[in-house]
Amino acid sequence: MVWALHDVCVTAVRPSCSGRSSMHRLLAASLGLAAVIGTAEAQEFTFRLHSFSSPTSLDHTMHLDRWAERVEAASDGRIRIEIFPAMQLGGAAGDLVQQLEDGVVDMIWTVAGFTPGRFPGMEGIELPFMNTGLSATMSPAAMEFALEHLQDEFDGIKIISIHTTDRAILHTVDKPVRTKEDLEGMRIRVAGRFIGEAVRALGGVPVGIPLPGVYEALARGQVDGMYINWAITLPYRFYEVTNYQTDTALFQGTLLTLMSQDAYDRLPDDLKAVIDAESGIAYAKRLGEIWDGQTEAARQATIDAGNEVFELTPEERARWIEAVRPAYDAWIAEMNRLGRDGEALFEAVLEITAKYGRN
């Protein structure tokens, strides 16, 4: 643009021009300069978004696809989002953050737990019983915690949203779990290190199995149960291979929609405003409401399949909270090992989740 402006100026003041032709040249130069500026202002941007989820999943149909449509419409087509679901660009789900940081893609949809140790502070939101039970309230809590206390974990990353699943509960195959003693020795599929610590503290045996393999593991008796949120049970039909649901929330998983800060910084201010309008705490809450809208349908489908759904008594739940304290201690110790103030961060988790309704 600098060279174009320089060329225009030279043409406009060339001394050999007559008065009339000089005016014509000046007018043409002005129009040319306006075209250059207009082209710069109307520059278009295409961003690639890589996701682990299938294109028919709730993640896409109710979140990513609609988000992209709103951004494209609000930008008058100057921003285009190309979505690649189901790891179409290669790699495993655990590679998504690295792909974003390496510039292979511009945006990702991932789960914090897919990359163990990459977002250790964020795992504080997933600690046992640090939840509200509703994604509409837990999602803004997670977003606020990240923005206020974990900016170092998101260096070079623009956070579009951090939201949570609906409540994750215990689903078992052959044995109902109504007390801590009932869980003794049971093999329980978990997602996340600190939920594994909690299950171990409660007497169970934590087992890590990728989500696509969980149905078969339950059907074959390789595990006795699983901790997973209600909404995901509907598309995976987990009610077919379980019989009992202890419907007391243990945790809520965190889901991340992230953009490369470099990609965001390339945008002019008006297009940054478009992205900002579809980001942040308010948007996280909207996503949470979508997730909560799936809970009751999944729960009812489970009941209709003949499963028995019940809750821990308040007294038993209090016993479980006391029993899982080793998971809190392990997270605090990890934060301290990383040079952070683990105790202060744990207090921040307590404060923020209480603010949004932790019970």
Image (cartoon, grey):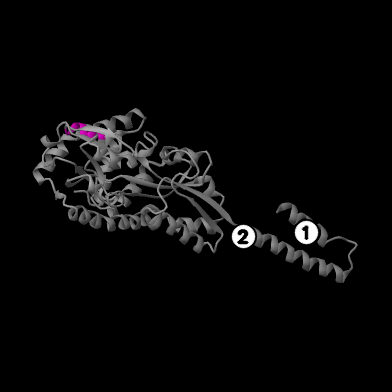
Residue 255 spot, x, y in % from top left = 36, 46
State which quadrant residue 321 falls in: top left
Residue 114 image point, x, y percent: 37, 38
Q: Secondary structure at mark 1?
A: helix
In the figure, is residue 97 to the left or right of 288? Answer: right
Q: Which residue is mark 2?
A: 41
Indicate the amino acid at tag 2: Glu
Q: Was residue 179 drawn as part of the magenta stretch in this picture? A: no
Query: 244 or 18: nearer the eye?
Result: 244
Q: Which residues are magenta?
A: 196-202
Chief secondary structure of the magenta portion? helix
345 relative to 48 in the view: left or right: left
The local crowd at label 2, few if under 14, some if 14 to 19, many if 20 or more residues have their Cα within 10 Å, is few
Residue in view at x 22 percent, y 55 percent: 301
Q: Is residue 121 left or right of residue 303?
A: right
Indicate the amino acid at tag 1.
Val
Which residue is label 1 attached to? 8
Residue at image x 72%, y 52%? 2
Q: Kindly report the distance in space between the C-alpha atoms of the residues bearing marks 1 and 2.
A: 19 Å
Please say if 67 is above or below 175.
below
Element carrying mark 2: helix
